[in-house]
Amino acid sequence: MIGQQQSVDCNVKSGTRKAVQDTPSQALSDALVKVATSRDRKAFAYLFEYFAPKIKRFGVKQFGNEAQAMELVQDTMTSVWRKAHLYHHDKGAATTWIYTVMRNASFDALRKMKSNKEEHISEDIWPIIQDSQTDDEGFKDHLQTAQIQKYINKLPPAQRDIVKGVYFQEMSQEQLAEHLNIPVGTVKSRLRLALQKLRAELGDQA
């Protein structure tokens, strides 16, 4: 009877140890604190080993692409290393905090992908009347004719500044955004609207 009880106790202890190993919440929290307070590389390696496969699985589901999933792993764990000092163990589990960092990184990646997609759309509509050129002076010189200038001057000031900056001053969209103190996305949208209006004007005159 005593032997059976000892066997049960051993099984319980073994099961308890296994449960702790499966969900090492305290160990993860301790490791994150060590990274925050002493930049402990071993603690960070422990966190990386635990979270990297989970973040990768999330990334594959999110993006459908293993390369982007691995970028998410790198971005997330880099942020964990840099921002570990923002974690407070008394306000939540380490897993909750790191998965929040992961979601923020995935949102940033999705915004970047959307921005790149818009960049391609913007490039597609840049040649307003390029197909109608009959000389070798180039698109920029063609835009500078009196007729095109007249249409550009009809644009709202905000859109007119963007068109002139891109085509006449040969500024990049990023340079214009910095020059005008507006987001790059605003530059793209204003340029898109301006080109659509110019196309409509030129189409009416065709």
Image (cartoon, rainbow, N blue to C red):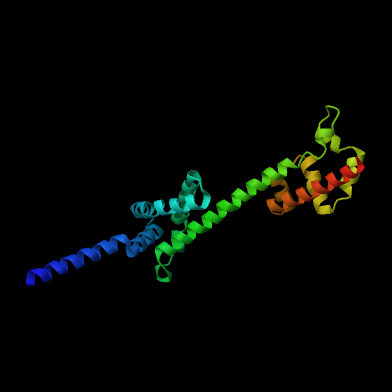
| In-front residue for pair 170/190 | 190
Question: Residue shown at 34%/54% (left/top)?
Answer: 46
Considering the image in quadrants, where does the N terminus appear?
bottom left
Which quarter of the rendering shows the C terminus? top right
In the figure, 83 relative to 8: above or below? Answer: above
Rendered position, 137 above or below 91: above
Residue with the most extreme top position: 136
Determine whether 20 is above or below 140 in the image.
below
Question: How far from the left and from the top, in percent, is residue 121?
Answer: 70, 45
Query: What residue do we see at 77% from left, 42% from top?
Result: 166
Residue 131 seen in render: yes
Choose between 74 and 34: the one closer to the eye: 74
Side (left or right) of 24 relative to 182: left
**For residue 137, side relative to residue 114 (left or right):** right
Residue 183 in the image: x percent, y percent?
69, 53
109 in relation to 125, above or below: below
